[in-house]
Amino acid sequence: MYAVETVDLSRVFELKGKSILALDDVNIRISKGEILGLLGANGAGKTTLVKILSTLLLPSKGSAYIHGYDVVKYAKDVRRMINLVSGGETPGYGMLTVRENLWFFSQLYGLSSSLARERIDMLIKAMELEQYKDVRMHRLSTGYKQRLNLARGFINDPKVLFLDEPTLGLDVVNAKHMRKYMRDWVDSDRARTILLTTHYLAEAEEVCDKIAIIYKGRIVAYETPSALKASLNNGVSIKVEILSNDHTPTTTSSSSDNRSRMVEKISRSSGVLACMLEPLGNGENGYDDDMGKHEKSSHSNGRYDSNSNNDDSSSSSSNGLTRLRIMLDDDSKIPDLVSTLVLNGYKVLSVKKDQPTLEDVYMRYVGMKDNGMG
Amino acid sequence: MGTSDIMDDLILNMKVVYARAYVRLKGLLREPHWSIAEVIIPLLSLSAYVYMYTMLNAPAEYMAFVIVGGAMLAFWSNVLWGMSAQLYWEKETGMLQHYMLSPASRMAVLLGMAVGGALNTTLRSISILLVGTLLFPVEYNLIDINALLIVFLLTITALYGMGMLFASLFLLYGREATHIADLLQEPIYLFSGIYYPVLSSQIFSQAVKLVASIIPLTFGIDAIRLLLIMGRGIGDVTLHILGLSLLVAILLPLAYIALRRMEEISKRHGRLTLRWQ
C-alpha cells in the first residue's frame, strides 16, 4: 500500500464559462518513508493536486488515496492522517500566543493534554520558537509566523504531510534548518511521508527522494533526482556569457523584450533543447553563488519559473552582459550556436560546459514543451 | 462505525468546542477595552429610548422593557457579526482551511464559536442590564426564575442556531456577507421589539407578528419581559416556549444541512479556501 496514490486524477475549473484543465490524468505513487518533490511553475497544478489529496477539493475525474483511503469517500479518516502547511498562510489567531495557538490546533486533532503539552514543547524547541512562545502571533515577524505554521503542520504527527512551498518567507539559515528538520522527521520514522511542492529546484534536490515535474497539469517526469539527471546523458548543458554589441540606450522593457526575443531565437536553433537566462547576482533562500554549482544555476531570486524566459530578470543582464544556460542535444552543436549568437550581434565572452543539474532536467522537460518541441 | 469510534469522535468534538470557545473568551480578556465599548454603546442607544418614554409619560415598566431589550440586543449583534459572518472571516484570514483540513466536525467548530460567543455576550448583556438598572429607575418583578432560565436558554440556543445556519449561507455569498449582516440588522430591530413590546401589544398586525416570530429574539424578549418585569409565571409563556423549541428543532438541523451543503459546493467549485471568491 502506498502512502499516497493517484489514479488518472483530473481536475477542471470552470472560470467565466471557460474550462481550465488544472490536472490531467495525474498518476503518482509515493511510498511510505519517502519525500516527493513536486516541481512546477505557477499554475502548473501543484496546489490543486495538494488540495485534492488533503480533501479540500474534489477531483473532476480519477481517484486519490492516502494510505489506501479514498480521499473523497473517506475524507474524515484521511484528515486524521494528514496535515498541510502552505507558505505564507495564517498560522493561527493573532491574539493568541505561539503556545496557545499550537494548543488550539492540537485540540482540532483531539490530542490529550499531556501529549499536546509534550508535542508543543518539542515543536517550540525544534522550530527555535522558545523566545517567542508567549508572544502573541500578530506580533511575530513573517519568518517566525512561518515557523509557527510549520510547527502547526507537525502538531498531529501526520502520516502524510503536504508542504506547499513551506520555506516561502524564510531566510537562508531558517530555510536550511527547516529542510533538515523535514528530512530528519521522515528518516526518524519510515511510516511518515512528505509531499513537498516547491519552486526551488535545489530545495527539492536537497531533501527529496523522488521528484515529479508537473507541467500544465500533467506529470512529465517522475524519478529520483539522480535518475532524472542521468536521463540527460545525451544532453549537454552550457553556460554562455554574451555582450550585446548594440550600445543604444534602451528602456528596461525594451531591453527585456530584446532578451526575450534572443532567448526565443536561440531556443529555435538546431540542436538546442532549451535556453534560459541565468542570474548574475545572488539568490536567496539558501541558494546563492556560494553554495555550489547546483545552487549557482538556479534562477534569479533562487526560484525557478518557467515564465522567466520572458521575465525582466534584472540580475540576468547587466550593462549589456547576459548569461544564458543552454541545453544542447550534442556538444558538436556548440560552434553553430556561437555563430548564431555572433550573427545576431552578440559578442560571446565565454562558453563553459557544466554538469547537468535538476534545473537542466526541468528545462529539458518543461523548456522543450514551451518551445513546442515536447 | 464502532462504539469506540463514536466515543473518539465525541471526545474530539468536545475538545474542539472547548478550544474554539476558548479563543472567543481569550479575546474578551485580551481586549477588555472592546468589551467596555460594547457595553457603553448599547447603553447610549437605550438611554435615548428611556428618555423618550419618560417624556411621553409612558408606563414605568417601559423603561425596564428598553433595558431588557438592550441587553438582549447584544446577543443579536453577536449572532450577526460574531457567528453569521464568522466563517466568512475565517476564510478571509486563512483559518477556515485549517478547520476543513482537520477531522473535527464542522458543527463542533460552529458550536464552539456559539458557546464562546454566548458566554462572552452573556457577560456583556448582564453588564448592560446592571448598569441600565443603576442608571434608570426601573423595577423588576420576577416570581418564576426557572421559567426565566428556560426561556433564556431556549432563546440563546435558537438565536445561535440561526447564527450557525447563517454562517454557511454567508460564506456562500462570499464578500457580500457584511452587506447581508447590515441588511439584517435594522429590520430585526424593528420587528423583534427590542425597544417596545411586539407580541403582547397591538403595534403590528397578526400577520406581521407571525413573520416576526421567525426571529427567536421576538419570542425571547417578549417572554423575558413577561417573566422578569410583569411578574408572570411559566403558564403565561407556554406559547413562547413552544415557539422557541420549534425554532431550535428547525434551526439546528438546518444549520447542519447548510454546513454540509456549503462544504460540498465549495469543494466542488474550489471556493472553500480561496480568498476573495
Image (tube, coloured by chain):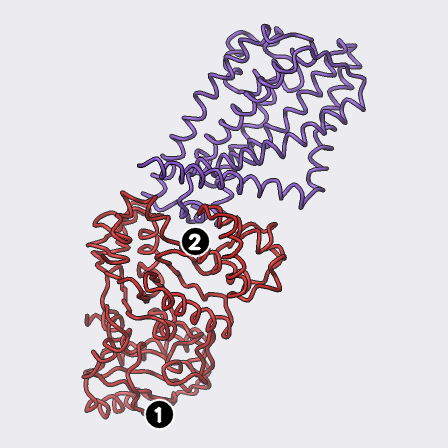
Chain colours: A red, B purple
Q: From the viewer's perspective, is residue A299 above or below residue B142?
A: below
Residue B267 in sight: yes
Residue at left 35%, top 93%? A350
Give percent across and percent down for residue A147: 51, 63
Residue at left 20%, top 78%? A231
Give percent across and percent down for residue A187: 36, 68
Q: On the image, numbered disc 2 is attached to which residue? A: A156
Q: Which sits in the foreground, A102 or A358?
A: A102
Tell which subunit mark 2 falls on: A
Q: Quadrant of residue B219?
A: top right
Tell which subunit mark 1 falls on: A
Give percent across and percent down for residue B42: 70, 29
* Mark earlier in primary sequence (2, 1): 2
Q: Which mark is residue A347?
A: 1
Q: Which mark is residue B38?
A: none
Q: Is residue A299 left or right of residue A271?
A: right
- SS class of the residue under badge 1? strand
Q: From the viewer's perspective, is residue B276 above or below residue A221?
A: above
Q: Is residue A267 left or right of residue B9?
A: left
**Amino acid type shown at disc 1:** Lys
